[in-house]
Image (tube, rainbow, N blue to C red):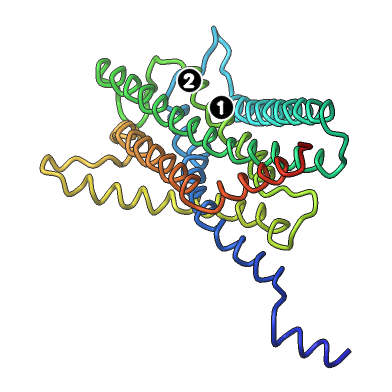
Amino acid sequence: MMEQSKRRWSACTVKEVEETKKAICRIPVCLSLIMLGVVASLGDTYFQEQASTMNNKVGSYSVPLVVLQLWYKLSRATLGRLYLKTVKRLSSHSDNNMNNNINSTNTNKLVMISSISYAGCAGIPISMIFTVLCCSVAAIVEKNRLDDFYRKGLDSTTEKVGMSMFWLLPQYLLLGASDGILDKSVGLLFHDQIPTRSDRFMPLFCSGIVGLGALANVLSVFAASKISDSRDDGTSWFGDTLNDSRIDSYYWLLTALSSANLIYFTILYFCTSLRSELRESDQTMDHMEPS
C-alpha cells in the first residue's frame, strides 16, 4: 500500500492526464461567462434605479418595485424549465428514433449524451443572444425615459418621470431568460453519464465565474466613467443621480461587449476541443451502427 501511494504521487494515469487536459480546454469557455455575469448584475442595480425614477402607479394604487424582481424570478424559473423540458423532449425523441434501428443499450446512452451535450452547448449562445437583446432594450427604454425627463424639465433629485415603470418588464423578461437558460445549459454542457472528476466540479466553477462577472461590473463602470470623462464635451455617463447620467450609453456599450462575447464563444466552439468532443461522440455512434 505504501509503495502504491508513493507511485501515485510520482506519476499520473493516462485517464487523469486526459481529464486534466479536458478541464483546461474548457476554461476559455468558462471565461466567456464573465460578460453574462456583468449583465446579470444590472437587475439589482441600474434596473432598480431606473424603476425608482419612473411612475409606479396603476390608477391610485402605488405598485411596489419588488414586483419587477418577482417578474424577473418568474421569467428565470419558467423559461429555464421550458428550455430544459424542450431539451429532454428532443433527447427522448432522438433516443426513440435510435431504438427503432438499433437495439443497443450502449448506443442509446451515447445518443442521450450527445443530445444533452449539444443542448448544453447551444444554451450558452442562446443565453448570450438574450443578453444582447436585454441590453439593447434597456438602452432604448432609458433613452425614452431621459427624453421624457428633459422634455418636462423635472428636478433631477426629487421628481419622477411620467413614464410607467412597467416599460421595464421586457428587459427584466430578457434578463430572466438569459439567466434561466444559462443555469440549465451549464450543467448540460458538462454532463456525462459517467462523470469525470473535472465534470463534477465544472458547473460550480462556471457559477463562480458568473459571480466574478457581477464584481467585474464595478470595474466596467469605473472604466466607462473614465473613458466618458476624457471626452471633449466633458460630460460623464455617470452623474450624481440617474437623471444626470447617460446610462443608455453604458447599456449600448454592454450591448457591443455582449455581441463580441457571443462571437468569442462561437470562435471557441469551432476552434477548440469542445466541438471535437461532440463530433467524437457522433463518430462513436456511427461506428456502432450495423452495416
- In which image quadrant can residue 162 be found? top left
Image position of 53 (left or right of 41): left
Q: Amino acid at mark 1?
A: Leu
Query: Residue visible at 52% across and 14% down?
Result: 57
Residue 37 placement (x, y as % from top left): 51, 46
Query: Residue visible at 46% across and 15% down?
Result: 164
Q: Amino acid at mark 2?
A: Met
Image position of 278 (left or right of 101): left
* Quadrant of the snapshot with the N terminus: bottom right
Q: Which residue is mark 1?
A: 65
Q: In whole angstroms, how far apart are the C-alphas of marks 1 and 2?
A: 9 Å
Given residues 152 and 189, the one toward you in this image is 189
Residue 87 placement (x, y as % from top left): 70, 30
Given residues 62 and 125, the one toward you in this image is 125
The tally of labels here is 2
Q: Are marks 1 and 2 in contact (CB under 8 Å)?
A: yes
Question: Disc 1 or 2, which lies upstream in sequence?
Answer: 1
| Element at label 1 | loop
Image position of 243 (left or right of 284): left
Image position of 170 (left or right of 2): left
Query: Residue visible at 48% across and 38% down?
Result: 42
* Quadrant of the snapshot with the C terminus: top right
**Above or below, 97 relative to 31:** above
Numbered mark located on residue 165 in the image: 2
Q: Residue furthest top?
A: 59
Residue 185 placement (x, y as % from top left): 64, 40
| Element at label 2 | helix
Numbered mark located on residue 143 in the image: none
Query: Residue visible at 61% across and 60% down?
Result: 22
